[in-house]
Image: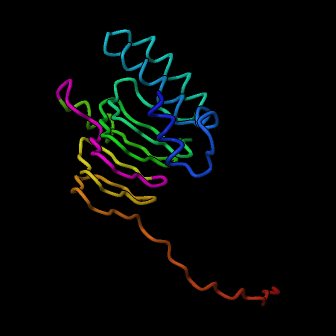
Amino acid sequence: MLEDIETTLARDPSITSRAEAVFHSTLPALWIHRVAHRLYGRRHRIAARVLTSCARVLTGIEIHPGARIGRRLFIDHGTGVVIGETAVLGDDVTIYQQVTLGAVGWWRDTLRPSGDRRHPEVGDRVTLGVNATVLGPLTIGDDALIGAHALVLGDVAAGSRIMGEPTVTRPRKKADLRTDSA
């Protein structure tokens, strides 16, 4: 737990003390997930789901109890973060708000053999930017950066930088002030 507090203190410049870090949304979500994950592994699935539902209500972060999370995870502004059942996260991963680590969809997943991975595997020291969506049983290599609003549907090599579509500014058309008088 102390390592989690130190990670939050080190990675969020707005946090100024360990006491303040305890109230950052990452920590209750992560601590509840650890308990739920143990329960889930011992086939206490309902109890695990109750805990993760409480964590989601409390923090806005939804981590399935089956997900495997490495050390020193940091989720900044965690509202809307979703981490699916078979997702695997390495150490020192940073996630920003609205990130989804999900499956492709039930229509595809029902074709996979039971027990197959349906969600992403994220390497060590990966950063997932705001509203990044990573879908399916793909692999994100170590030290990759997935930029804001990126949609990732295939493997990403270690050290890669994947960016979402940039916005395009178009000149505004002048309004036609003439009116039809019919």
8 inside magenta stretch = no
Residue in the picture at 22% in, 56% down: 158
Compared with 129, 67 (above or below) is above
Q: Quadrant of residue 172?
A: bottom right
Q: Which residue is located at x 78 percent, y 88 percent? A: 177
Q: What residue is at 43 percent from the left and 18 percent from the top?
A: 35
Residue 127 in picture, x, y percent from top left: 39, 52
User: Residue 69 location in percent, x, y?
Assistant: 35, 33
Could you tell me which residue is drawn at 32 percent across and 45 percent down? 135
Residue 125 included in the magenta stretch of the image: yes
Magenta-drawn segment: 113-131
Left or right: 176, with 153 as reference point = right
Q: For the stretch drawn in magenta, what is the main secondary structure?
A: loop
Please tell me whether residue 15 is drawn above or below residue 166 in the rendered image: above
Does residue 66 lie above or below 40 as drawn? below
Q: Return the x and y of residue 79 as percentages of the image width and height.
A: 56, 41
Is 57 drawn above or below residue 180 in the view shown?
A: above
Q: x, y (%) of residue 76? A: 53, 46
Q: Nearer the viewer, residue 113 or 89?
A: 89
Q: Residue 121 appears in which quarter of the rendering?
A: top left
Which quarter shows the C terminus? bottom right
